[in-house]
Image: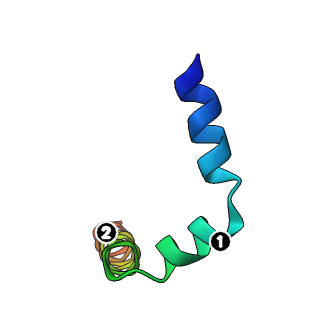
Amino acid sequence: MPWRQFIRNLTNNEELIRRLSESYPIRRAAQLTAYFYSASKDKFIEQR
């Protein structure tokens, strides 16, 4: 149970979340997620 409280404290830390969201790996992961979502949606629409 201490892990749950630790994770909750980390996710409620606004400064930490802001710094993570501005980091390159997180931004790149978001870009790739958006790209693959868009590409797969377009392919699905073409197949219909």
Marks counted in the figure total 2
Give me the residue at 38% from left, 70% from top: 37
Give me the residue at 59% from left, 67% from top: 17
User: On the image, which quarter does residue 5 sit in?
Assistant: top right
Along the line of sight, which residue is nearer the eye, 38 or 14?
14
Rendered location of residue 18, percent (x, y): 60, 76
The disc placed on residue 37 is none
Query: In this view, which residue lies farthest toward the top?
Result: 1
The disc placed on residue 15 is 1
Rendered location of residue 19, percent (x, y): 53, 76
Task: Find out whether the residues at labels 2 and 1 contact each other: C-beta distance under 8 Å.
Answer: no
Rendered location of residue 13, percent (x, y): 68, 59
User: On the image, which quarter does residue 47 sit in?
Assistant: bottom left
Q: Quadrant of the N terminus?
A: top right
Spatial separation of the CA atoms under disc 2 and disc 1: 34 Å
Give me the residue at 52% from left, 27% from top: 3
Left or right: where does residue 2 sit relative to residue 25?
A: right
* Residue at numbered disc 2: 40
Choose mark 2 or mark 1, whichever is in front: 1
User: On the image, which quarter does residue 23 sit in?
Assistant: bottom left
Q: Amino acid at mark 1?
A: Glu
Is label 1 in a helix, a strand or a loop?
helix
Label 2 vs 1, first from the N-terminus: 1
Q: Amino acid at mark 2?
A: Ser
